[in-house]
Amino acid sequence: MTTDALLPPQARAKRTFLFLQGPSSPLFSKCAAGLEERGHACLRINLNIGDWIFWRRRGGVNYRGRRERWPEFVRDFMARNGVTDLLLLGEERPYHKAAVLAAKALGIDIHVVEMGYMRPDWVTFERDGISSNSHFPREPQRILAAAAGLPDPDWTVRYRHRFVVEAGYDLLYNLPNVFLWFLYPHYRRHALFHPLAEYAGWVLRLLRKKRTEAQTQETCGRLLGSGAPFFVYPLQLQTDYQLRAHSPFANQQEAISRIVSSFAAHAAGNHQLLVKLHPLDNGLIDWRAHIESEAQRHGISGRIHTIDGGNLDRLIDAAVGLVTVNSTAALGAFRKHKPVKTLGSAVFDTPGLSYPGPLDAFWKDPFPAERALEDAFFRLLAQEYQVRGNFYSDAGSSAAADAIVHRLVGTSGEGRAAAHNSQT
């Protein structure tokens, strides 16, 4: 196993934070700066050159060993360096799962960052994990009690970023990993597709954008003009761990098959299903052809429509309801008081919020969430499980970093109470 030397114990630090892989943005580096200003020590284990590029500060150690040796290494590293807190982006990546298991065995606090449930202006910050691993209460009465007295969320968008910035950060992270792979020869990606294949897919999708937008406008215009009742099914990314780790489906094909077969057997004959591709889908799988094949297999090809583009909010406005595995698109439907059926684990899969019955029954008698529970859900989610900001703009990542540091250590940086009290 080849690694850089371990750092010496941080005996004089109040707490020692270990950062693993984060978003392709300055967020984790800014969090570390804020924590160090308050007297805490910050360490980082770089698993690839992209990790190193987005850290570039003291406290970094490079792991160049094999993945099968990683659990032993990370446990030893945390024990030797007196790590008190572990921060990472998503807890289901193979390297992260091993680190989380080791952290739990050592009594180390775990903090998970993800894209905000209430995006685009929020970042998810939870203790231990998201979805199946989230501490968000699932019982309606607990949600109502916990949200009592909390303010309504401020939905004003404060931090915007351009797609070109997000794409630039992604390239800055992934391209060095492709061409300088020999610097970390044993690193294994968690993504399903090679980065160059993904970029080629996105380029081809951009080249087809004018045509697909015209097709989307034609399909939506025809569907809305017909007056036929329809449901919306927004696809998630095939690589999304929400789908891969927090649902009963091994992949998106299984989810599509389940939803299409249920719709064919149980939806009223005049009902339509509108499937919307994810805006960041790489185009490497022909979802339109796959969905049409499923529709033909069940004899309903004229009732299922697939679009690449369109305004999801406007479609939800006109829809009967929304069905999803566990996409955060469901929150847009809740805000519009539309019925939602969730098929995977999610913080919003609560009776009285998401449709409580089976999918087969949802098509026949969908009903929306209870207003009081809906309002309480958003108040509690915004106050305790989200922070304002984003990953990719300078102002947004600074705001998110400041809020995360405050959740972790408070303004004074004393003790662990602030980190725990804000999430229980």
Image (tube, rainbow, N blue to C red):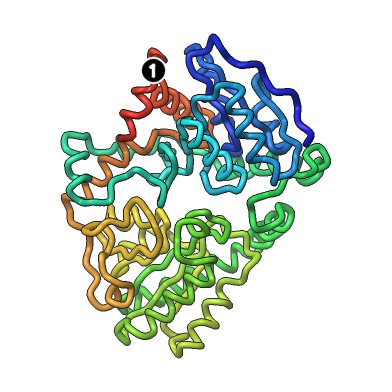
In the rendered image, the residue lying farthest to the right is 182
Q: How crowded is mark 1: few (under 14 residues within 10 Å), some or many (20 or more)?
A: few
Dividing the picture into quadrants, the one containing residue 405 is top left
Left or right side of 153 for 93: right
Dividing the picture into quadrants, the one containing residue 389 is top left
Query: 122 or 305: which is nearer to us?
Result: 122
Left or right side of 25 for 370: left
Residue carrying label 1: 415
SS type, badge 1:
loop
State whether residue 129 is above or below residue 228: above
Query: 146 or 368: which is nearer to us?
Result: 146
Q: What residue type is labelled 1?
A: Gly
Q: In the picture, which quadrant includes the N terminus?
A: top right
Dividing the picture into quadrants, the one containing residue 156 is top left
Across and down, in percent, residue 76 comes to: 63, 30
Left or right side of 318 for 401: right
State whether residue 234 is above or below residue 219: above
Q: How many marks?
A: 1
Q: Which residue is drawn at 32% across and 30% down?
A: 422
Q: Which residue is drawn at 33% across and 34% down?
A: 423
Q: Residue at x 81, y 44 (%)?
A: 179
State whether residue 168 is above or below residue 81: below
Across and down, in percent, residue 213 comes to: 53, 65
Left or right side of 69 for 362: left
Across and down, in percent, residue 181 comes to: 80, 43
In the rendered image, the residue lying farthest to the top is 12
In the rendered image, the residue lying farthest to the bottom is 299
Q: In the picture, which quadrant includes the C terminus?
A: top left
Query: 332 or 7: which is nearer to us?
Result: 7
Across and down, in percent, residue 199 comes to: 69, 54
